[in-house]
Amino acid sequence: LLIDTGPVELREQFGTPEQQRESATSGMWVFLMTEVMMFGALFTSFAIYRLYYFQPFTQGSSEMNVVLGSINTAVLICSSLTMALAVHSAASGERSKTFWLLIATIVIGIVFLAIKFTEYGQHYAEHKVPGIWFDSHDPGANKIEMFYFFYFVMTGLHAIHMMVGIGVVSVLALRTLVGRISAFYHAPIEIGGLYWHFVDIVWVFLYAIFYIPGIHK
Amino acid sequence: MGPVVSRKTYVLTWIALLGLTLATTLFGYVNLGQFSIILAVLFAMAKGGLIVSFFMHAKYEQRVIRVIIVGGGVWFTILFSFSLRDYIN
């Protein structure tokens, strides 16, 4: 990843850095659409179960920690801002600024995961781990358990994406540090940014379906 | 190649996103029954739209990117609506 491949890392199949950037960007967007389909299948299944088990799913949602969930949404939105500003700095050729904005993105991403795992810890302490340790006196207990299955699978898959994102941004920060990114060719930062923002969008929807429907209770 | 979106636009998008998050949470406290999740998802779609348009600068991209995004949206709509059709009826 850090090997020198020429003055602007222009691959031989491309005529100009601009053409290379366009190919890379459209490739990333196609990949993100496959991600939409993967998360989309989960969102669709969730919608169907929620139609069937409206009350138990609202009950499950009311057991969520809204304070931590809301803070985490704000945290992730802040990380998207630092990522977007990093792209801006990279395009302007401000290397040290780009590096520190990427580091800030990584740190905020880690804060998100720390809060998320704190929540998981709370669910464990409250015996709300589906399949392993699930206690509930509610008559619809197994349906509430289904809610938790969706919750753990979807937020877990999202957390894995966050870890991948942190890895990607770390490599980008390293490449910026050693001078592999310039105003002339900064597509890697843009592409990494697209992935980061996409993961942010997924969380925005997860927050809407898991935390919001039960908070009035 | 300079930056396509200004810092000011990014900051304004960020403020709008935080505002919409606050609105999502506050409206959640109103008991709207089945509609509370629909309203929350509508807010999420507005936020997603802002992120895609400005943070991911899709608004400023060439046409092929928009075709890819619309394509993804269409396929997801097919997946979602055709699956749900069986259960709603």
Image: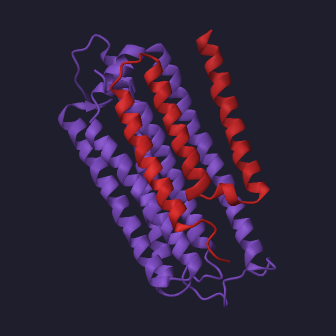
Q: Is residue A126 left or right of residue A81?
A: left
* Residue A141 position by quadrant: top left
- Quarter of the image where the N terminus of chain A is located: bottom right
Q: Residue at x 21, y 15 (%)?
A: A137
What colour-coding does the image apply?
by chain
| Residue A184, image x, y percentages | 65, 82
* Residue B25 position by quadrant: top left
* Residue A21 position by quadrant: bottom right
| Residue A122, image x, y percentages | 21, 39
Q: Is residue A137 left or right of residue A79?
A: left
- Position of residue B79 relative to residue A76, above or below, is above
Q: Residue at x 32, y 30 (%)?
A: A130
Q: Using the image as rendered, state which of residue B48 and residue A7 is in the foreground.
A: B48
- Position of residue A33 relative to residue A129, above or below, is below
Q: Is residue A134 left or right of residue B46?
A: left
* Residue B16 appears in the figure: yes
* Residue A168 appears in the figure: no
Q: Is residue A51 left or right of residue A133?
A: right
Q: Residue at x 62, y 59 (%)?
A: B57
Query: Chain letter for red?
Result: B
Query: Chain letter for purple?
Result: A
